[in-house]
Amino acid sequence: MRTEAELLETARRYSFRGRMDKAQFTGPVFVRGSGTVVEDVNGKRFLDFNSGQMCAALGHNHPRVAAAVKEACDTLMHAHSSHFNVKEIELAERVAGIMPAPLKKTLFLQSGADANEAAVNIARKYTGGHDVASPHISFHGLSDTTRALTFAGWHAGYGPAAPGAHAIVAPYCYRCPLNHSFPACEFACLKVSFDLLDAEASGRPAAVITEPLFSAGGVIEPPPGWLKRLKEMCEARGMLLIVDEEQTGLGKLGTMFGFERDGVVPDVVTIAKHFGGGVSISAVTTSAEIEDKVAAAEFVVTHSHSNDPLICAAGIASLDVIAEEDVPAKARSIGQRLKERLTALAQRFKLIGDIRGRGLLQGIELVKEGGGREPAKKEGAAIARFCLERGLIFSQRRGGSVLRFVPPATTTPEQVDEAAEILTEGFERMTAGGGTGAA
Ligand SMILES: Cc1ncc(COP(=O)(O)O)c(C=O)c1O
C-alpha cells in the first residue's frame, strides 16, 4: 500500500476540496474500521467518537450489515426504480413498524438532503403552499432546497437561495436571542417567529422543518414542550410539521425518535445516517392520507438508485440490529457514562460553559472566563487537535467552541473512560500552558 505521504500527495493533485471541516491535505488517511475503532494507513488506531460522518452509529462494519450487503451482491444489487423489488417492500413494512400511527408510508432515497428535500416538496404538494421555515441553527443538507433551509452555516455564498425558505428563532436557551429564560419565556421564540411568518406570508405556508435536537447547530436541545407548541402553531396555519430525525432517530438519543420526548407525532419524518448502517440510504415517512393526496397529484421523486435492493437490505439489517441489540438502551447507558465524565470535566474546568445532549449525541460548549459566555473557539480547536493526535476523534461546531461527541453503540464503558482521559489531558494542557502544544 502507498504511504500516507504518497496518498496525501496524490490527494493534493486529484481531490477536490469541498469538505465541511477540513481544507488541508493532512492525515489521518483511514483504511479500516470495526466497532468504535478506525485505523489509518500508518496502523494508528483511533476511538471514533464521531461515528464516521455520524453514519456508523451502530459501529463500523457491523457484521450483520456487511452480511446483508454481501447477500445483495449475490442476488440483486440494483433494480428498475419504477418497479418494486422484494427488499424495498420489506423495508417499507419494517419502517412502518417503528413509526407511530398514522405514519405508515415510506419512500427511499440516498442522502439526508434528498429525503428532506422530498419532505419539503411533499408538504408543498399537499398544502398547495410554498413557504417553509426552519430554526436559525438548523442543518438539513446541502442541496439547493435544503441549503436554503440550513441556517447553522454553509448557507451564504452560493447565489440566491431557493425561494420560500424562512428562518425562525431557534430555542437556543443558553444564548437566547431574545434574552429570555425558560420557562418564564413561554416559548417567546415561537410567538415572535410565527408573528413574523404570518406578516411576511405571501400565500399559503407549507411547513416547518426542524431537528428535535440541533446537532450541527451545536448540540442544542429545545426545552421540554417546544416541539409540541411548534406542532400546535403549525396546525393552526394548515402547515405540516416535518421532523428531521436523520441525526437523532433510530435509537441514538435513547428513544427510537427524538420527537417522542414531547409526545408529538409529526406529519412527515425523515431518517438517514445510520439507517443504512454505513451504506447510503434515507427515507421519508408520512401518513396514508398525505401520501394519497400527493400521489394523486402526480408527485414524483426518485433517483437512479433510490430503492435499490442493496441499500434496502442494509436498511433491514440496521433495523434488525437496532431491535435485537436494543440500541436505544445502549444509547442510554453509554450516554449516561459519557454525561458523567463530561460533568466531572466541567467541574474541573471553567472553560466548559454548558453540557448538552442525550444518549449517543452529546456536546460541551466552551466559553472564555469572565462570565460573558464568549465562545472559546481557538481553545476548542486546540483541544480537538490534541485529542486527534492522541487517537480520539470528535467534531467541533459553532466555530470550534462546541465539542460534539457521537460514539457508536458498540462503545464500551472502558472506551468512554479512555476518551474522557484523553479529553481531560487536552483540557489540562490547555489550561496549564495557555495551549495544548499540539501541532
Ligand atoms: C439533521 C441532519 N439533516 C440532514 C443532513 C444531511 O444529510 P446528508 O449529508 O446525508 O445529505 C444531516 C447531515 O449531517 C443532518 O445532520
Image: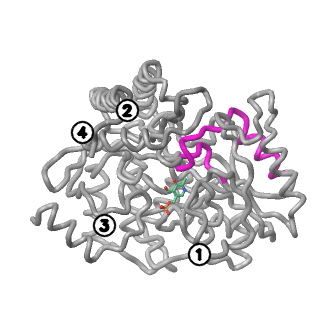
Question: Helix, strand, or loop for circle 2?
Answer: loop
Q: Name the residue under label 4.
A: 390
How dense is the environment of label 4, judged by Cα within 10 Å: few (below 14), some, or many (20 and up)?
some
Q: Which of 86 and 313 is in front in this view?
A: 313
- The x and y percentages for residue 314 are 37, 59
Q: Distance between the residues labelled 2 and 1?
A: 53 Å
Q: How far apart are marks 1 and 4 (CA)?
A: 45 Å
Q: Which of marks 2 and 1 is nearer the N terminus?
A: 1
Q: Earlier in the sequence, mark 1 or mark 4?
A: 1
Q: Name the residue under label 3.
A: 72
- The x and y percentages for residue 206 are 78, 63
Q: How is the image coloured?
A: one colour
Answer yes or no: is residue 85 visible: yes
Q: Which residue is drawn at 43% across and 26% down?
A: 342
When asked about the image quadrant of residue 122, the answer is bottom right
Q: Residue at x 83, y 47 (%)?
A: 192
Q: Name the residue under label 1.
A: 301
Q: How far apart are marks 3 and 2 (CA)?
A: 54 Å
- For badge 4, the amino acid type reads Arg
